[in-house]
Image: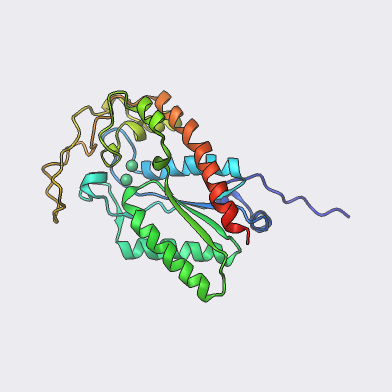
Amino acid sequence: MTAPNIRSPRIRIADMTWYEFADRVKDNPIVFLPTGSVEQHGPHLPLLTDVILPVAVAEAVAGEVGGMVAPPVTYGYKSQPKSGGGNHFPGTLSLDANVFIALVRNIINELARHGVRKVVLFDGHMENQWFLVEAADLALRDQRAEGVHDLKIIKLGYWEFITKQTEKELFPDGMPSWELEHAAVMETSVMMHLRPDLVRVDLIPDHPPAVFPPYDIYPFDTRPIPPSGVLSSAKPATAGKGETVMRQVVPDIAASLLDAFGPLMSK
Ligand code: ZN
Ligand code: MN
């Protein structure tokens, strides 16, 4: 009598049966948790841009490393003027930090409870970063208390893997900064490459980069924030540039993760 074949080549945990999930976890795969935001991205990109992009990149990387991608955390920490235009734009739906931290901590603990030992917090929204660090730290503390000592967590922003060479192709005339890249050349280009159906090309804004003072003020001083919500010109965006980004970052992230988990995991 032969056992039924439940081996799954699937990447999305959401698409797996529980049999497939349980079978895959036995191999100690890298599990990706994309995190993003529901945030305005100018007149031309959808509110879920910070989720669509890290999910797509994480799925491509997972394909290269035999990993699995968990359903994403679609809401994120509050949009800030200097990196996301600010939390006041219509449609920007954000979480308080304690809620976001608790949510990510809970999901990591759930993955660990089912035997996952390699977790990648795969961020698409800059404002999340320190709260991801906190969630990882607290989940590691929880797991140590449970007697689990071999859980490893990596936190990354996929844009941080873009090399100087790719940067030159994206911005032949020099780039303002990654913060001011909100809804600008990189995000627009990758969306044009991956989801052209969601890009309003006719509405892509073209204005100079925002200039902010070297301090933050609350409530926000909205005067330095471009009314479009885009922090620097998105005009030079092309689908070809988006393809360049994907072609470069996907193998680079895959190689980094195999390297980072490799020596860490061998006891
Ligand atoms: Zn974004
Ligand atoms: Mn964002």
- Compared across the picture, whether 32 is left or right of 79 comes to right
Above or below 109: residue 157: above
- Compared across the picture, whether 247 is left or right of 218 comes to right
Q: Where is residue 178 in the image (x, y as percent from the top left)?
A: 30, 39
Q: Please name the residue shown 14% across and 56% down the image.
A: 218
> Is residue 89 something that shows in the picture?
no
172 vs 216, nearest the viewer: 172
Which quadrant holds the C terminus? bottom right
The quadrant where ligand 1 appears is top left
Q: Please name the residue shown 48% across and 67% down the image.
A: 140
Q: Position of residue 111 (x, y in %)?
A: 54, 62
Q: Where is residue 61 in the image (x, y as percent from the top left)?
A: 54, 41
Q: Quadrant of residue 21?
A: bottom right
Q: Position of residue 177 (x, y in %)?
A: 27, 38
Q: Please name the residue shown 89% across and 55% down the image.
A: 1
Q: In which quarter of the image is residue 50?
A: top left
User: Which residue of the protein is positioned furthest toward the right in this rendering?
Assistant: 1
Q: In which quarter of the image is residue 130?
A: bottom left
258 vs 109, nearest the viewer: 258
Q: Please name the residue shown 34% across and 39% down the image.
A: 46
- Compared across the picture, whether 146 is left or right of 180 comes to right
> Is residue 118 something that shows in the picture?
yes
